[in-house]
Image: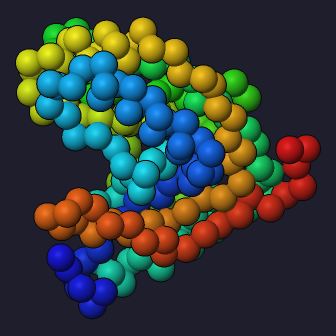
Amino acid sequence: MKSAFSDTWRVFCAIELPESVRNTVLKHIARLQEAVPDAKASWSRDANLHLTLKFLGEIPRTAVADVSAAASRTVAELAAFPVRLEQTGFFPKQGQPRVLWIGINDSSGQLNELDGRLEEEVAKEGFEKDPRPFHPHLTIARLRQPRHARTLAAAHRQLEFEPQEVAVSELLVIRSELSGEGSKYSVVSRHALSLESKL
């Protein structure tokens, strides 16, 4: 594990999910594990459950403040807004499933706007824009072996996931530290969407 004084930090920007929503997701994961116990998968833990908007990877520690500044500019004059976690699916759509996800309904388009603004502001600090279209989702599992993968993906699609509403009110800059026990996350900075909203 790298110390706090490492030359580079692994950093990303994300939306935090409330405990009640994380608990609902964890219950869905437990039902899948019970339904297909022999499937080999890396399951998301409570600490992993956040909506990632921008993954920057390993960046110079001296550049972390620049990312926080970009996040602060991103949320300027934006109001909090709701999104809904609903529907289930997997990637890729063809072939062996490798990732299970829960979809994000951004009916207002405000999450897409937030992501677009973040990409623009981070690019001003010298980081590359993500060329891929923005498709928000919450990853709940990465399948390690083909065996039982299709069965697990089918169970994921068939089990009902109760839709969950999330108020997007903060953008977080988070540090991820990798270790043999999994990733450890620490919040570097929080940036509130402080314009008055109707939430």
Report the residue at 43% width, 72% height from top.
186
Q: Is residue 181 left or right of 53 when viewed as pictured?
A: left
At which x and y percent is residue 33?
A: 29, 29
Q: Position of residue 24 (x, y in %)?
A: 55, 36
Q: Position of residue 67 (x, y in %)?
A: 47, 69
Task: Please give the name of the residue rendered at 40% of the width and 12% of the height, measured from the top-left corner.
Answer: 157
**Quarter of the image holding residue 94?**
top left
Total marks shown come to: 0
Please provide percent x and percent y for residue 141.
Answer: 30, 35
Using the image, determine if residue 8 lies above or below residue 146: below
Asked which quadrant contains residue 146, the reply is top left
Q: Looking at the image, can residue 101 be seen?
A: no
Quarter of the image that includes the C terminus = top right
141 in relation to 118, above or below = above
Residue at the extreme front: 34
Q: Where 91 sits versus 81, above or below?
A: above
User: 118 and 85: which one is in front?
Assistant: 85
* Image quadrant where one finds the N terminus: bottom left
| Residue 77 visible (yes or no) | yes
Left or right of 121 on screen, residue 44: left
Residue 98 or residue 122, whichever sits in front: 98
Q: Residue furthest bottom?
A: 5
The image's colouring method is: rainbow
**Residue drawn at (45%, 39%) of the image:** 26
Q: Nearer the viewer, residue 15 or 152?
A: 152
In which quarter of the view is residue 92 placed?
A: top left
